[in-house]
Amino acid sequence: MSDVKRHKREVRNYLVGFGLAALLTIIPFAITAAGGLSRTWFDLAILLAAVVQVLVHLRYFLHIDLRHTPRENLLALGFTGVLMVLMIGGTLWIMGNLAARMMGT
Amino acid sequence: MSEVDTKAHDEAEEKAYGFWLFLMSDAILFSLLFATYAIMVTATDNGPARTEIFGYWRTAANTALLLSSSLTMGLASIAICEARKAAAFQWIIVTMILALAFLVLEIQEFAGLVAQGAGPDRSGFLSAYFTLVGTHGAHVTVGLIWMAVLCLHLAMAPIGPAVQSATERLTMFWHLVGIVWIGIYSMVYLPGLYQ
């Protein structure tokens, strides 16, 4: 591949990522400004936009790609994801349970 | 590729992997700060709650600044990879201006909160808020210093493999800072602003 072609591809990669990220940012800000959703649907919509945008950043900005990224980098990323779920989920579970048991005291 | 090139390439890859591991541990640190915030968010001690202290447009401006800086940092890294010095300088400086504007807005926000009696010592909620957002702000500051150092390197010598490999790590770092901010506006600011 010529240098010019590669340059164009890399710049386009960043611009596509930026466009998607901007869209996925505008959506939750618009939802917040508009109001009207119930709290549950609001939380779900914000969470979904955030998760998708994180994936967009990983793919287009950090160039994570299931085929070309070295396997050990993917393993570290996957392990980090597992730890996050365990630690955030575990913390919320235990502390939520504690709060429920402490109600009214 | 010559033998020297291959060696430099391997070294750069090893460093990128080591730095990737650091970033993953950093991400875990932030996830715990998020968990702490989620638990503390109701612990307002009859002080200011999350619905009272955040500004919509300030959050939007900070988000726009940081997201744009991710793009310009990426363009800087492409320019450095291709050894185009003028373009590299241009994009790094734009990135630094965006990051600096972000920090100014954040420091103003923190100062305003402290002035209205909503400092980190007011309640568990505010402690968790300042810890989470402040740690992110510290990362932005470190990134800014790193960019200044990179500018010095660029000014002093032609672009070589050492600067290119350092830029790769700086870019990864900056994108992580951007990803953490997605979590911050989604989990901290917008839920607080939603009525």
Image: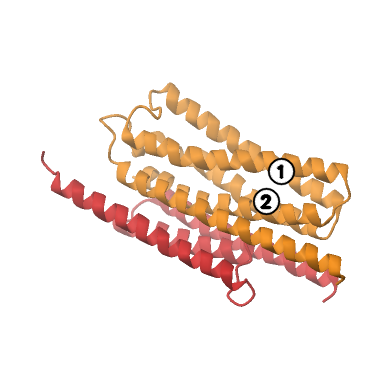
The image shows residue A37 at horizontal and vertical percentages of 33, 56
Q: Which chain: orange?
A: B
Report the residue at 56% width, 54% height from top.
Answer: B23
Report the residue at 46% width, 53% height from top.
Answer: B28
Do labels 2 and 1 touch, CB within 8 Å?
A: yes
Q: Which residue is mark 2?
A: B170
A57 left or right, relative to A14: left
Question: Secondary structure under badge 1?
Answer: helix
Asked if A101 appears above or below B3 in the picture, the reply is above
Q: Which chain: red?
A: A
- Mark 2: give few (<14), some (14-19) or many (20+) Cα within 10 Å: many
Asked if B175 appears above or below A73 in the picture, the reply is above
The amino acid on which the numbered mark 2 sits, given as a three-letter code, is Leu
Report the residue at 86% width, 55% height from top.
Answer: B84
Label at residue B147:
1
Q: Nearer the viewer, residue A6 or B159?
A: B159
The image shows residue B20 at horizontal and vertical percentages of 59, 58
Q: CA distance from mark 2 to mark 1?
A: 8 Å
The amino acid on which the numbered mark 1 sits, given as a three-letter code, is Met
Q: Quadrant of the C terminus of chain A?
A: top left
Q: How is the image coloured?
A: by chain
* Disc 1 chain ID: B
